[in-house]
Image (tube, rainbow, N blue to C red):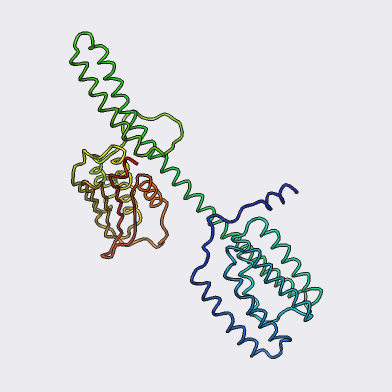
Amino acid sequence: MTSLVRSLWDAPAASPPPPRRVWRDWVLVAAIPPLVLLEASLRTDVPWRWLWAVVLIALVPTLLWRRTRPLPMLVIAFGTGAVVAVATGGDPQLAATAYMLVLVYAAFRWGDGRARIVGAALLIASTTLSLVFGPTTLTDLVGGTAVLVATISLGAAFRWRAGSRARELDRVKDDEREQLARDLHDTVAHHVSAIAIQAQAGTVLAATDPDAAVAALRTIEGEASRTLAEMRSIVRVLRRADAAELAPGPGLGDLRGLATADAAIDTDAPLVEVRLTGDAESVPPTIGAAVYRMAQESVTNARRHARGATRVEVLVQVDAAGIRLDVHDDGAAGASAAPGFGIVGMVERATLLGGTCTAGAAPEGGWTVTAALPRSGWST
């Protein structure tokens, strides 16, 4: 039991961290004081109503720091309320007091282990004071406890949901890094295999045909230079150690295959048109594989999620600045506006290669994915 409490006590704050403030905070802070004053002026039967109105208004700013300092704000609000309740001999009976539930929610949504344990103890102490000093009935106690439990449960549920999504996003990014590293490994393995073969041939021909041996050395030099360039392009990418194929993965030359993929299986699938302009031969295999993966993911998303799509256009442009990918469909976007894990993976892949990737609704209708990989990022 002690180990469980210690584990909870040392638990970190919510991840990802909360925003400091959003526009809703200012709306809340501006709206509560007038409501408190209105209720105090109308409910003449409430004892000490103007004192409680002043206290509640004075505590409103705690809402601005409820995410970044959840425990101190909870202690200030409930501590002040408890002191005034003891001094006046009763709890506040103004309905506006309910805004303090936002502080309870914040403590269990954003706080660390200490905030949750101390916050729970503070709520228990506050409930006990209500029983001792206030005219609290059993019905009030059960109802108030139910509201507190519901608020705490809501905060914990949203905390778990956000943490679960953050972990899933991290997993997708790790998978994308692994896939990118796998493409690098396969490309390098292909070049190294060619180097080994040429070296063996040069060794055999060195005694009888020096010119052929020199040609083999030149081939080795070219393959080695390309291999080093590939390795420098994504040197920070890591992967798990396992077997890999000796042939490079798909590249720009395989893009046209996206136009026919799944078309024979699903006759209602939108028509996919692929255009490739520029010098594709100047694009390193790893970059070509990354562009192919992003185009493949974009086309797959269009086929699965674009409602009523009849056409998907894939345009790849290679120039002196780098390579640009544009994928556009004419369908309606899905009901959810939240970015999917596929989009997260594409953004991660583009970022690792020194580029950018954006996805969203197009002004002319449909959905567009745009990725740009500058040549300057290929060798950093």
Above/below status of 211 relative to 188: above
Q: Residue at x 39, y 30 (%)?
A: 244
- Residue 312 versus residue 364: which sits nearer the camera? 364
**Which residue in the rendered view is the most extreme toward the top?**
207
Q: Is residue 28 left or right of residue 41?
A: left
- The number of numbered discs placed on residues in the rendered structure image is 0
The quarter of the image holding the C terminus is top left
Q: In x, y percent, where is residue 117?
A: 70, 58
Q: Residue at x 28, y 16 (%)?
A: 200
**Which residue in the rendered view is the most extreme toward the right?**
132
Above/below status of 66 relative to 218: below
Q: Residue at x 78, y 72 (%)?
A: 129
Q: In x, y percent, where is residue 334?
A: 37, 60
Q: In x, y percent, where is residue 82?
A: 74, 73
Q: Residue at x 78, y 69 (%)?
A: 128
- Residue 326 versus residue 59: which sits nearer the camera? 59
Above/below status of 197 relative to 125: above
Q: In x, y percent, where is residue 215?
A: 20, 20
